[in-house]
Amino acid sequence: MSGFAGLLGSGVVAAINPNNVPTYWFILPLVIAMSCVYSASRHESLRKIATQSVRLAGMILGVLFLAMAFLLVLNTQV
């Protein structure tokens, strides 16, 4: 077998099974994609899209981090 069929038969693709990947690893690409799409729908300039998407991604990740920290503190108090 050669090419992609060879990868399927060798088990290389099976090592990248989404069931083995921790769920939290999907947060960063989703936040980046979401902030880029939102910023692109609001602005025309590439520079403005880039700066606004970085700013929005930072705000989203900051809120997620604060919520995680609050829940962690709440969980350890019980």
Image (tube, rainbow, N blue to C red):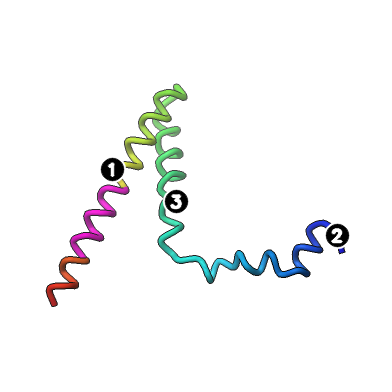
Q: Earlier in the sequence, mark 3 or mark 1?
A: 3
Q: Main secondary structure of the magenta part?
A: helix
- Quadrant location of the N terminus? bottom right
Residue shown at 53% from the left, 71% from the top: 19
User: What stretch of residues is rendered in magenta?
Assistant: 61-71
Residue shown at 76% from the left, 68% from the top: 10
Dot 3 lies on which element?
helix
Q: Callout 1: few (<14), some (14-19), or many (20+) C-alpha neighbours within 10 Å?
A: few
Task: Find residue 40 and report its horizontal and vertical position in percent.
Answer: 45, 33
Please check the rendered image and state whether residue 40 is part of the magenta-colored stretch, yes or no.
no
Answer with the quarter of the image where residue 6 lies: bottom right
Residue shown at 55% from the left, 66% from the top: 18
Give the amino acid type for the residue marked by disc 1 in the picture.
Met
Task: Find residue 70 and report its horizontal and vertical position in percent.
Answer: 18, 61
CA–CA distance in space, label 3 to label 1: 14 Å
The residue carrying mark 1 is 59
Residue shown at 33% from the left, 39% from the top: 56
Residue 2 disc label: 2
Dot 1 lies on which element?
helix
